[in-house]
Image: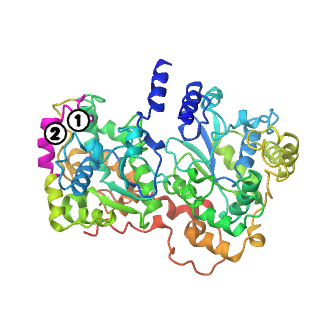
Amino acid sequence: MIKKIRAGIRLVAGKWPPGPELEVYPDDTFLIAYSKSGNTWTRFLLANLLNPDKQVTFLNIPELVPHFDVMSKRFFRDARRPRIINCHEAFRPHYKRVIYVVRDPRDVVVSLFHFQRKRRIIADDDSLDRFVTRFVAGEALKPSRLGSWGDNVASWLLMRDKDPGFLLLRYEDLLAGTETELARVAKFLNIEATPERISNAVVASSAHRMRTLEKIQGNQWHQSKDTRQDIPFVRAAKAGGWETALSDESVREIEGAWSGIMKILGYPLRFENLPERLPLRDAEKLLR
Amino acid sequence: MIYGVKRVLAYLMGADVAGRALAVYPDDTFIVSYPRSGNTWTRFLVANLLHPNEPVSFDTIERLVPDAEAQSSKYLKRIPRPRVIKSHEYFDHRYKKVIYVVRDPRDVALSYYNFSRKYRYIDDAYPLESFVGDFVHGRLSSADWGTWGENVGSWISTRLGRENFLLLRYEDLIANPEAEIAKMANFFGIKTDAMHIRNTVERSSAHRMRELEKAQGKDWISTKDKRPDIPFIGSAASGRWKLELSANSVAEIEAAWGTLMKTLGYELSARRIAGDEEFRGVQPAVSAGQH
């Protein structure tokens, strides 16, 4: 009860993060990604793109590309429009302009496994195989509003693909051609960005620079300060690590759950002839 | 500020309407639909199916199949588990077991128009054609539940073909309620016989529900203080749009959601739908894998 009263006072004072109850304006852009899908990197890229004269670090990123579970309701109310808002939600119809970052779920689970060890949610000797099973069931992040990887990705992609207010970025494309992808972001945000401004933003957000910043600021940044400092937040920053990290069994489990959506996204499967589980194709069959 | 204080008090007492903040239990079953798609009828069917020895009426339905968008968090916490809960939410991954009821959006628009007059959201002079425009473009009081296409599409694209998701079409419920109830019984894992199913249909008939509305409508949470001259229980028929919607309105709805409608088996009347040959989801993502 005391906890509730305290929460209530903060709520009235506007000091509470709004979360999904955030009041949305039509000119808001949401940066959305599932956990461990390049969200923080994209925030740095965006912050550097939008603020070429600022030093973007872990200490000011919470304000430059604010997350609605972190910054206060008042902060969002007073923020200059158009706002850019970071979150991890599955499909929400109120968000009309969305940049969605997606990453191969086989790499997501490996990264999430390390992240949950860093946060002391799982122990070092916990098995990755068992973690994958929980990941596929949408239970690797708890408690969580995100849903499973498939829920989160499919709900956005299938609802908003082709919508002019929706920009899909693949983490893998961001790695392979960061400038090209960031130029698409700039265009989406109606920012006139010279190639120089883009490449400056890319350099200022490099994995190398982010690792250096993490070494200095990791014990102060709200996301990492109370976590194990021996496991880095900024990790490999590579694609395809799953190929050696995951067992065949785990790969089959992930591909079996989401083969349809993975194919749409262009992630080659290791196993063929898995049941096609992109539901819409079967809709007519199922109804009759 | 006053609003804030009120909300905090409601939150402290658990008296706020549950809605999307509802605490979900793993053994909950949800009856989900867009508004005016046969949700209340399905609630009656499910209540009669699961509680053959209880009188199902507007007086008891909020206990048997409570409404997450009308009842408070506190109220819903007291409902004995496993609960069956009514909801209009667009995709919510926490709902593990879902019966989704879908209805032809052209009939939904028409029914919603009358409902909006009943609720005094619009007055009688408001043109149906303008209302259809609001309906298609998400300008209704129900905007928080998305548009028809967003609500239906978000569930179908994530859950269809998966375990624990049962899609029912309102039109099939009308045409052959016994077969659809058998699907529900199977979904709940309960044994039924022909008698039980027939009773379920009869006790939930439009005729009976209209009688109940006449007697209890002034007390039921979803109809009290609303215009009594317009019934909550509508035509309980399919295809009324053919008589009552203008060609423009039909074209507007079909242009917005044509492919999703076709996928669901709703035949289009307009010959060609511009710019929406495929439902969005079926096409590969344009940007992926092209670099």
Taking depth in this image into account, of B205 and A156 the one nearest to the observer is A156
Q: Is residue B46 visible?
A: yes
Q: Is residue B68 above or below residue B232?
A: above
* Residue name at image x 51 percent, y 73 percent: B276
| B108 left or right of A88 in image | right
* Residue name at image x 32 percent, y 66 percent: A190
Residue that label 1 marks: A221
Taking depth in this image into account, of A220 and A116 the one nearest to the observer is A220
From which residue to which does the magenta span run?
A205-227
Q: The residue tagged with tag 1: helix, strand or loop?
A: loop
**Badge 2: chain ID:** A
Q: Residue furthest bottom?
A: B271
Amino acid at dot 1? Trp
Residue A35, position as x, y percentages in the image? 33, 44
- A12 is within the stretch colored magenta: no
Residue B83, position as x, y percentages in the image? 63, 34
* Residue name at image x 46 percent, y 44 percent: A22
Residue A189, position as x, y percentages in the image? 33, 62
Tell me if label 2 and label 1 are in contact, CB under 8 Å: yes
| B213 left or right of B289 in image | right
Residue B225, by quadrant, is top right
Amino acid at dot 2? Glu
